[in-house]
Amino acid sequence: MADRFLVVKVGGSLLKSGFPPTLLKDLKSAALNHRLTLVHGGAALVTETAQKMGKEQKFIVSPDGMKSRYTDRETMEVYTMVMAGKINKQVVAFLQSGGVNAIGLSGADGQLLRASRKKKLIILDERGRKVAIEGGYTGKIEEVNPQPLRCLMDLGYMPVVAPIAVDDEFQLLNVDSDRAAAYIAKALKADCLILCTDVEGLILNGALVKRLKLEEARENLPKIGHGMRKKIYAAVEALEGGVREVVVTKGALETPLTSALNHEAGTLIVPQ
Ligand SMILES: Nc1ncnc2c1ncn2[C@@H]1O[C@H](COP(=O)(O)OP(=O)(O)OP(=O)(O)O)[C@@H](O)[C@H]1O
Ligand SMILES: [Mg+2]
């Protein structure tokens, strides 16, 4: 059995037009010599579904410039329905249709992702001033239990994880999917984390960045727009936690994972 661990995150940006068939094919190739866990996003579908249900979504920006959904109780219910329900099960069914034996989980299952809930959040208001608001149901991942993933992979299943965590009071919490993938990669001591999205990789000054060192990634964070900034931040966290390399790449390429593993596509982020 393969002894290398690979974590792949599939962005919700990709799932809007359906799971890319080339990515499914390449997951099968990568699974021949890696033990593979998939994490998915789906922010846009959560927003769309909430709005259809008459629940307007609010987004907040932290003092360090990270944008996130403001998750009140009702939003957390919609988030759970969409992430752990619709998206997770559709991804699992699609993988099954291609012969991948996928099993869907959220971070609550087997207490895979334990997080703490912030009672208060400091955000920037419209005029850029810092204000404190109720924390809502957003979590900071504190601990990953990789055991359920290892057991499933040992038995030949591919775990598919929805970005939901559970806290000490067994409350479900919204966690960022890029960062959830990074924490899972750290806990599995993965060789590589691949973040698949709808763009070729990190673009700076109009050009694709092919390789970035950890220190450069940290320095460039303030220059990067919202969706990509989360990924580069997640990459920094993964590398700091011992993951050997992170690739941010387009998921709809002909061979997105093989190309990323061969350093032939996307933005490669490495410790040195
Ligand atoms: N400097 C940058 N380089 C590349 N993309 C950037 C940059 N700044 C902002 N972006 C945006 O980041 C987006 C990708 O992040 P986004 O959160 O939208 O997708 P995702 O993470 O794949 O989906 P989800 O959040 O649902 O999982 C790109 O579509 C692009 O518009
Ligand atoms: Mg995103």
Image: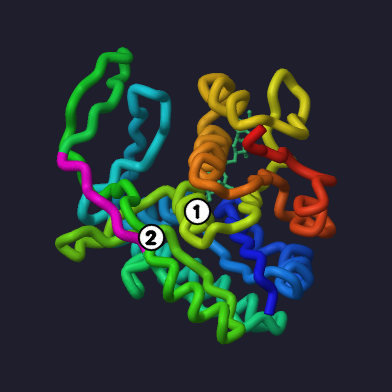
Tell me residue 48's x, y (percent): 44, 52
Residue found 57% across the figure and 25% down from its top: 224
Tell me residue 242's x, y (percent): 54, 47
Query: Mark 2 near mark 1, Cβ–Cβ under 8 Å?
Result: yes
Helix, strand or loop at label 2? It is strand
Q: Is residue 173 left or right of residue 104?
A: left
Tell me residue 229's x, y (percent): 53, 33
Residue type, numbered disc 2: Val
Does the magenta-highlighted stretch encompass residue 235?
no
Q: Which mark is residue 72?
A: none
Q: Which mark is residue 186?
A: 1
Q: Which quadrant is the N terminus positioned in?
A: bottom right
Tell me residue 33's x, y (percent): 74, 71
**Residue 81 at least partly seen:** no
Helix, strand or loop at label 1? It is helix
Q: Earlier in the sequence, mark 2 or mark 1?
A: 2
Residue found 51% across the figure and 48% down from its top: 178
Q: Which mark is residue 144?
A: 2
Mark 2 Cα within 10 Å, few/some/many (few <14, many 20+)? many
Magenta segment: 113-119
Residue type, numbered disc 1: Lys
Q: Is residue 139 left or right of residue 226?
A: left
**Residue 104 at least partly seen:** yes
Residue found 77% across the figure and 25% down from its top: 207
Toward which corner of the image does residue 124 lie, by quadrant? top left
